[in-house]
Amino acid sequence: MKKILTLFALAAACLCSASAQEFVYQIGKESKHADPEMIYNGHYLGMHNGLDCWITQSEKGTNIFVRNRDWQVVHLDSNLVPVGTLELPLTSRAQHLASVMQGSRTAALLVDSSSDERTLILKYVVDMDSMRLVGDKFDTVNDFTYSDDDHCMVWAATSPDGNHIALVSVIEFTKTKKYTANITMFNSAFEQEWNRQYALNSTEQVYVDNTGRIVTLGVEEDGETQHFIFNILDAVESDSYDISIKCDRVLNMRILNIIGPHVVCAGLFSPVTSDPKEGLIGGVVGMAFNLDSTNVTGFSMRPFQNEDMNIFMNKKTKKIQREQTQTFIVPVDIAPTAFGGAMAAGKNYTQNRINNNGTISSAYRAIGLHIVAVDTNGNIKWVRNIRRNDFTDEEKEELNVSLVPTEDQIFLLKTENRKYPSHYDIAKDAPELEIGDKANIVLYSISNDGDVKKTLVEHKTKHHLLAVDTRANGTMLLLTKRGSKTRMAKLTH
């Protein structure tokens, strides 16, 4: 207990030194029970009987996890010690689609597409008090079979309030060039509300709002024209809208939020004159689609500017760059906001090298963060840059950063080199941080108007941030790693 109090005092000192007394930071003990892979794969469910719960998967074969990699529902205390677990049978090759916890029950959808000719969608409902499957069984929602030349794609989305879970499945038949689309809606207890087979045009993103309406988005290129295809689905009907805009090539378009009738989206663009194989990114895109008028009400493209390029290249901001495009720029996280939504993009890439014995090893790098905010009219409200220069020789998931939305601001949490200034400053290039070295855990607060403040959460720690989950009351759970040990800290605003 004395050690925990000492850690708490140190953490409080770090926060006060950054003029952020409104934050309270409590650190739990290090744990060997929850391995890092569990955190990488974890999906936070919520609190039950005073314990935090996740659905997750690991191969470590610890006292939490079985050796066949089945997914499990796990109760963990504040020191990441397991208090209750339940293995979900036949899920070792499955992927998580969606999960919710309502009251004393958790429900989850998983998809097993390990076979070339079959896709299984499985549903599990867990009684969290007894930690048993309800009815001592699980259900097969869909069992799709097809030839090995065909393709099956599956998406799931949960409404912000957790009351609606949409499942969208599409099978493309290569020889006949036809497809079937199956759409199912569940309530928060994972009881089926409706099921339909609708014609569904190009789909890359699926979103369901609090009314139970499903919106999907796909982007197709036709020469110098981009087609933005919105499908709107409910229990009664489906409609598809193809919006054509003559512009640069749009990539990685994301649905950030739905506010009333406004579908707010953000993405990246590549110059239409460039070779797609080069992977050049020239800036960010904002868009809004109105569900009532079924028109795009706003479309904005913002090219990268000199400061943005220097952030991605890790150069001083005064450096003049002739080129205005960059490679390896990808979205790293998104967040809904009161005014629309925000997307963080970064330069993330893999470096491969051939060792003396002929084997290949990889290092993962992340340089710069570029955050773009989009309003309900599709306007780019602001962009903000944050320095980053991190690498790891282990898992690329170690380079994750997290956006946490609140009503009046966005929090960005990350690990960074301890030589960074304690206040928000991007003028100088960033020193390199190898994940595992002593570092700072920091929080950037970005207001809805784009004002940025920096808070030093933890100073000179060998723990680095793996993930951030948020309780219903707004408490942020910071999950970190030091070597093979993990830890959870609570950050309250």
Image (tube, grey):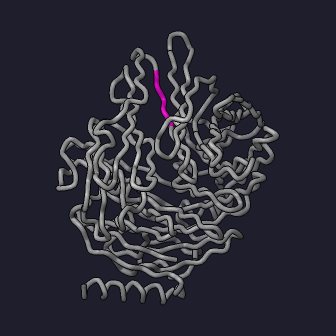
Position of residue 165 measured from the top left corner of the image (x, y, whole percent): 53, 42
Asked if the stretch drawn in magenta spans residue 152, the answer is yes
Left/right placement of residue 468 relative to residue 321 reads left
Residue nearest the viewer, comparing 61 with 474: 474
Report if residue 63 lies within the magenta region.
Answer: no
Give the percent coordinates (x, y) of residue 447.
65, 71
Q: Is residue 79 above or below residue 39?
A: below
Q: Main secondary structure of the magenta part?
A: strand
Figure check: 114 above or below 56: above
Q: Which residues are magenta?
A: 151-155
Residue 191, percent from left and from top: 48, 38
**Which sits in the foreground, 492 or 212?**
212
- Residue 485 appears at what percent x and percent y? 24, 66
Residue that appears at 42% across and 79% down: 25
Q: Is residue 77 left or right of residue 101?
A: left
Residue at 21%, 64% (x, y): give it: 32
